[in-house]
Image (cartoon, coloured by chain):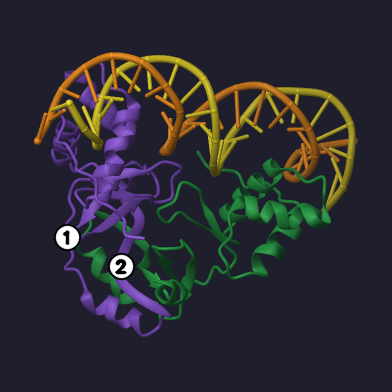
Chain colours: A purple, B green, C yellow, D orange
Amino acid sequence: MESVQKARRMTRQRRKILEVLRGTDTHPTADWIFEQVRRVMPKISLGTVYRNLRVLKESGEILELNYGSTYSRFDGNTDNHYHFVCLSCGKIGDVMLPLSDQITRQAAGAVDGRVEFHRLEFYGTCGDCTIKQ
Amino acid sequence: MESVQKARRMTRQRRKILEVLRGTDTHPTADWIFEQVRRVMPKISLGTVYRNLRVLKESGEILELNYGSTYSRFDGNTDNHYHFVCLSCGKIGDVMLPLSDQITRQAAGAVDGRVEFHRLEFYGTCGDCTIKQ
DNA sequence: GTACGTGCAAATATTTTGCAGCAGT
DNA sequence: ACTGCTGCAAAATATTTGCACGTAC
């Protein structure tokens, strides 16, 4: 019943995907990452992007976010941090607020099971959209 | 530029979908709701379920949740409350913890824009799955 | 050399939509 | 009667997968 860990290879594609993700703070979609990588590797396929995003997520090198849309966004910053989602334009930003262990501990008492971590998202209207309104 | 509010009709289908959603605390998927409603309305279509879930969400009568899966789950309890997601079996439970306005206020100072509300999810292993391991 | 990874294309899965007739108000 | 809503089926979207070949180790 033990799950066997596969040997992972750092391919050119995987390295580039990780590089793109670490080089932005826009929390991009799989398709956006695909377009960026394609500029330097025109033959890469979207399937490869998805496969790598899954591998990278499983190994804890990136995070997958699904905040109220039909598609996933990815985050190359794995320090646990909070997000702010703009209800008007859909943009996702980072929130520079200290993580609270206390919140997780509080929940531990209110839940049947073991709480490992928490995720907190703020929703509202971002600065740009407030101006346009 | 004003968005005009449409008159909504409480059809048999819409009423039943809402009833199903309010009658469970399992945070079901659109498909599960479809199967339940189908037992009493065999001719209802999945498209109608999706259309109604959207209308009900827009009018604030239900919540849509997307917690790390490829599909949405829905919640008939709109008192803002927190959720606990089991990483092992995917089950979503409610967390009976008092909502914290303080958290939203704290974020307001750390974000460029207007923060309206927050969502907090806890992740871990639920009681059932802890036993099985 | 081995076996994991890739590109391609087809398959899935979930959600949305056009349309003609139905039904709530 | 007016206009929103339904069922049906097809379309759109996002993601996954089978396969034969390629490549990191």
Earlier-in-chain disc, 1 versus 2: 1
* Image coords of residue A62 (percent x, y): 22, 48
The residue that disc 1 covers is A96
Q: Secondary structure at mark 1?
A: loop
The chain identifier of the residue carrying mark 2 reads A
Residue beneath the point at 31% across and 36% down: A51
Q: Answer few, some or many: residues within 10 Å of disc 2's Cα (few below 14, many 20 plus, some between 14 and 19).
A: many
Q: Of the numbered discs in the image, which one, if any, rests on residue A118? A: 2
* Image coords of residue B110 (percent x, y): 19, 61
The chain identifier of the residue carrying mark 1 reads A
Between B86 and B75, the residue placed more toward the observer is: B86
Above or below residue A112? Residue B93 is above
* Image coords of residue A127 (percent x, y): 26, 49
Residue beneath the point at 24% across and 79% down: A102
Q: Hey, what amino acid is under mark 1? A: Met
Q: Quadrant of residue A53?
A: top left
Is residue A128 at least partly visible in the picture? no
Above or below residue B43? Residue C16 is above
Q: Quadrant of residue C3?
A: top left
Above or below residue B107? Residue B53 is above
| Distance (Cα) linking label 1 and label 2 | 16 Å
Q: Secondary structure at mark 2?
A: strand
Q: Hey, what amino acid is under mark 2? A: His
Q: Answer few, some or many: residues within 10 Å of disc 1's Cα (few below 14, many 20 plus, some between 14 and 19).
A: some
**Number of marks in picture:** 2
Are circles 1 and 2 on residues that touch, CB within 8 Å? no
